[in-house]
Amino acid sequence: MADRVIFVCIVVLAAVYFYATAQIPSLEIGDPLGPKAFPRLLGIALLITGGMLLMEMWRARGKKRQEDASAPAVDRRVVMVISGVVVWTALYLSVFELLGYVIATSIYLLGLMAYFHPGRWVTNILSAVLFCVGSYVMFNYVLGVNLTKGILPF
């Protein structure tokens, strides 16, 4: 049953994603592929993933579901951790424009690393800050992709 729910979620997500990519305006100058190429490629990958899941469900349709009876119950702690990560990500997305890429992403990564790797503060802080600064420099100065500055002056 879970595989069917996941399949429906993938198909709905792919449909919404393709609709959103259709709303991206086409540019007459610049890259011949335009800004729609990469998002559409991701949408195709999402549809292929859904198709693979559908094929797996089709192959297993005649087999008895013996493993379902022996499957462990859903652990409440796992559900709480996943819910916490979803809420933390929503909070990150809500302050992203205000704080900017470097600060918001550093705080986001530091929060996740502090939970999943507790007690390693120096490693967590260095990893979060160096990743954010390094990726900001790469995108902003090497690739020419402007990321939000937020409250930082650079």
Image (cartoon, rainbow, N blue to C red):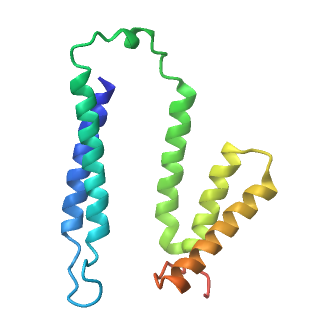
- Report x, y in % for residue 19: 19, 61
- Report x, y in % for residue 140: 53, 82
- Report x, y in % for residue 37: 27, 70
On the rendered structure, is 73 left or right of 56?
A: right
Asked if 113 appears above or below 143 in the picture, the reply is above
Asked if 63 appears above or below 78 in the picture, the reply is above
For the point 26% across and 20% down, which residue is it? 60
- The answer to which of 103 and 21 lies nearer the viewer is 21
How many numbered marks are there? 0
Residue 44 seen in the current view: yes
- The answer to which of 83 and 27 lies nearer the viewer is 27
For the point 80% across and 46% down, which residue is it? 119
For the point 50% across and 48% down, which residue is it? 87
On the rendered structure, is 93 left or right of 112?
A: left
| Quarter the N terminus occupies | top left
Q: Quadrant of residue 57?
A: top left
On the rendered structure, is 126 left or right of 6?
A: right
- Report x, y in % for residue 21: 23, 66
| Quarter the C terminus occupies | bottom right
Residue 150 seen in the current view: no
- The answer to which of 30 and 125 lies nearer the viewer is 30
Single out the residue that lies furthest toward the bottom: 29
For the point 63% across and 74% down, which residue is it? 134
Q: Quadrant of residue 109?
A: bottom right
Asked if 124 appears above or below 79 in the picture, the reply is below
